[in-house]
Image (spheres, grey):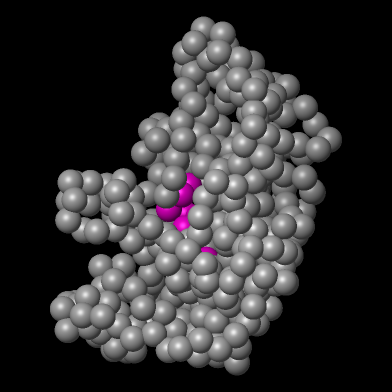
Amino acid sequence: MKAIRVEEHGGLEALRYVDVPDPEPAADQVLIEVRASGVNHLDVWVRRGVPGYTFPLPLTPGNDVAGVVLAVGERVRGVAPGDAVVVQPGVSCGRCAACLGGADHRCPRYCILGEHCDGGWAERLVVPGANVFAKPDDLSFVEAASMPLTFLTAWHMLVDRAELRPGEVVLVQAAGSGVSSAAIQIAKLWGASVIATAASAAKLERARALGADHTIDYEREDVPARVRALTDRAGADVVIDHVGAATWEASTKALAWHGRLVTCGATTGAGVELNLAHLFFKAQSLLGSTMGSKAEVLEVFRHAAAGRLRPVVDAVLPLSEAREAQRRLEAREVFGKLVLVPDGKETA
């Protein structure tokens, strides 16, 4: 089968479109014909490499997958060949206290498809039977593959970590990203008022179309000052930030007394300064967040099936054009998600 492989870290040339052996499902696994696979910043880190972290190269990237079941292992129940499914991006042991308590993302053996084991940038994929669930009929394979990682991340940040309440003000940085476009919708679903930032008029317009109440051009406007003006000087109750160094100062200055800043990444750098006096005097909280539970993914998709959350697909590209997909992502030419489909395959 065809797949994208990273054999050594590097530039876009490190993404190689090659032939690899067809995978075979073990007794507890499902073999899936991939119809669509999402593109995430995590795939960029897999290709580039991260100082101090070892990826199990060679590796097939791709965290988000939707497809059709081809075969199931003898111990798999509730899934059959021909089923249209979505893949849970997080794999866990299923036996430890965290897994049994519904917090599988805290499992000591937790891993993410496409980061710790082969992912969905391929024509076929094997995953544990526990990691698949039925694709909602109203979502295409492309739409379904655009949602798991980013919507799970945003949901966990807002609902679990920030404990968002109706009527609060949420500042969402970099609205064009997959996580932020999901966060805008989730915050509105929970009855919050949303202020979204972006660096172009087109992205700000799309943020408003998703439900943002106010928008700020972070390259031309003073974000903290605008947030204070929009909130009668109170600031934002919750700030969602995955950008890192480039937005950190604005995010902390825009935060209200007793506010919560939640971060899930640092695409522009992890080295930031923190004024501890502001933190303790204003009783603010800084919260880290990574992924979320399988149950949260199912909750997200229940809302999507009911039309309360919408996939945000920027463009669909053939699998062989994975380099172009990452180029667009790194150049910030994307609003929402890019999705890859196997060359010449049906996508809907």
Residue 214 appears left or right of 191: right
Residue 267 appears left or right of 158: right
Residue 251 quadrant? top right
Q: Where is residue 143 in the image (x, y as percent from the top left)?
A: 51, 70
Q: How many marks?
A: 0
**In this rendering, is residue 335 above or below 15?**
above
**In this rendering, is residue 225 above or below 122?**
above
Residue 223 quadrant? top right
**In this rendering, is residue 58 above or below 74?**
above
**In this rendering, is residue 70 above or below 29?**
below
Q: Where is residue 183 in the image (x, y as percent from the top left)?
A: 52, 46
User: Does the image show residue 305?
Assistant: no
User: Does the image show residue 11?
Assistant: yes
Q: Is residue 244 magenta?
A: no
Q: Position of residue 4 (x, y in %)?
A: 58, 77
Given residues 62 and 212, the one toward you in this image is: 62
Q: Which residue is drawn at 64% across and 32% down?
A: 271
Given residues 262 and 56, the one toward you in this image is: 56
Q: Where is residue 147 in the image (x, y as percent from the top left)?
A: 48, 62
Q: Residue at x 34, y 73 (%)?
A: 127
Looking at the magenta stretch, what is its main secondary structure? helix
Residue 216 quadrant? top right
Q: Does the magenta stretch include residue 152?
A: yes
Q: What stretch is highlighted in magenta?
A: 146-154
Q: Residue at x 64, y 16 (%)?
A: 233
Q: Which residue is drawn at 77% across and 57% down?
A: 331
Residue 265 appears left or right of 63: right
Given residues 123 and 170, the one toward you in this image is: 123
